[in-house]
Amino acid sequence: MKIPRNDIIGEIVDSARKTLTLLEEEKDVDFGEKPSLVGSEGIFDSIGLVTFIVELEQGMEKRFGVRVSLADERAIAQEVTPFSSITTLAAYIEKLLLEN
Amino acid sequence: MIFIAGKMAGLREMREDDKNEVVAWRNLTENARWLIQWEPLTTARHLEWFRDSTARQDANFIIQSPVGVPIGAGSLYGFDRQGGSAEWGRLSTAAPKRLALPTIEGCYFILRFAFELLNLKRVHGSCAVENTSAHRLNEFFGFVTEGRRRRHLLTPRGYLDTFELGLFPDEFETARSKVEELFYKDGRVPAFSPAALSFTQSLRLSLGAKNENPEE
């Protein structure tokens, strides 16, 4: 299945915003700058990332009717972690959708 | 020998030959800043600790990637064999944020080990109040914040307040479903291997099976 990259990015940003609200994080994140999701400059800590992934998986299903599984052995096998940035995550989701 | 293998991580017993990885992880700034570590840990000091810890029958684990690369460590220790409780902690990882998901799966395995195999009645822990990531991690697994110790930890950065946290089996049962929904959508929750059962027996800690009521 093919979903335009920008639509995937839109869902990632929406899910990230929802997660920050859920976690009551008062971070001023400029999503236009495609910030890192994890890492020293990342938006989320480990539990933030888990919450975000759950939000995103649900968001993808609701918005596009597709089920993606982001927490599995394929994600850890990638040379660059898919969660390092919004762009890498969008590319990873695109790849998963094409494989399915 | 692997104790349990999941989607992003596996768990096994820590060995002496893990020394280089464990020392490197503990000396990482992100990990060391929350430890009572006045100077960088050396291999000799680590081995001294490891041998003492093994003699005390602590359960020290290595979290590894699906292809067997060590990525983190964690422990159950300070066992109260009569009361059926233990402390958990000594968590360190190769890259705390990048390996967040495998570390969470590894922590989930350690807590399952505590309740399923050791039949513990309570697991407790503590973290610096400022360490919001660790506090959140504990609460994610169902730990309840039971109190705050003021200026409890003397670290190179001065005294830190700590949160005291506790977890009962039923609280973990409720919380573990969040992890299982994330990692095991197919419903196939991994089971412990015979190696894990054998390790449990070697610890001689199967408390609940013999002593359901500590007052008896």
Image (cartoon, rainbow, N blue to C red):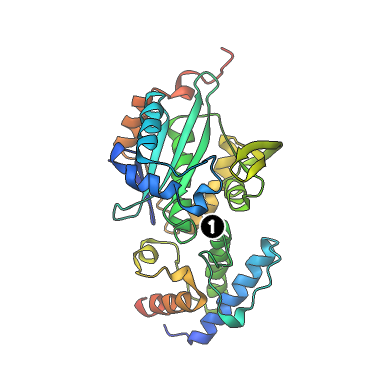
Q: Quadrant of the N terminus of chain B?
A: top left
Q: Is residue B152 visible?
A: yes
What element does badge 1 sit on?
A: helix
Figure quadrant of residue B149: top right
Q: Position of residue A94 (x, y in %)?
A: 43, 80
Indicate the position of residue B101 as horizontal and vertical percent values: 46, 57
Q: Which residue is more in the foreground, B138 or B38?
A: B38
Look at label 1 and name its amino acid.
Ser
Chain ID, mark 1:
A
Which residue is denoted by mark 1 in the rendering? A46
Image point 46% across, 18% down: which residue?
B210
How many circles with numbers are drawn on the protein?
1
Q: Position of residue A18 (x, y in %)?
A: 65, 69
Residue drawn 36% across and 65% down?
Answer: A74
Give the residue at x 66% y 42%. B160
Res B184 seen here: no
Q: Nearer the viewer, residue B157 or B173?
A: B157
Q: Position of residue B156 (x, y in %)?
A: 58, 43
Mark 1 Cα within 10 Å, few/some/many (few <14, many 20+)?
Answer: many
Placement of A62 over or under B107, stated as above or below: below
Residue extending farthest top: B216
Quadrant (top left/top right/bottom left/bottom right) for the C terminus of chain B:
top right
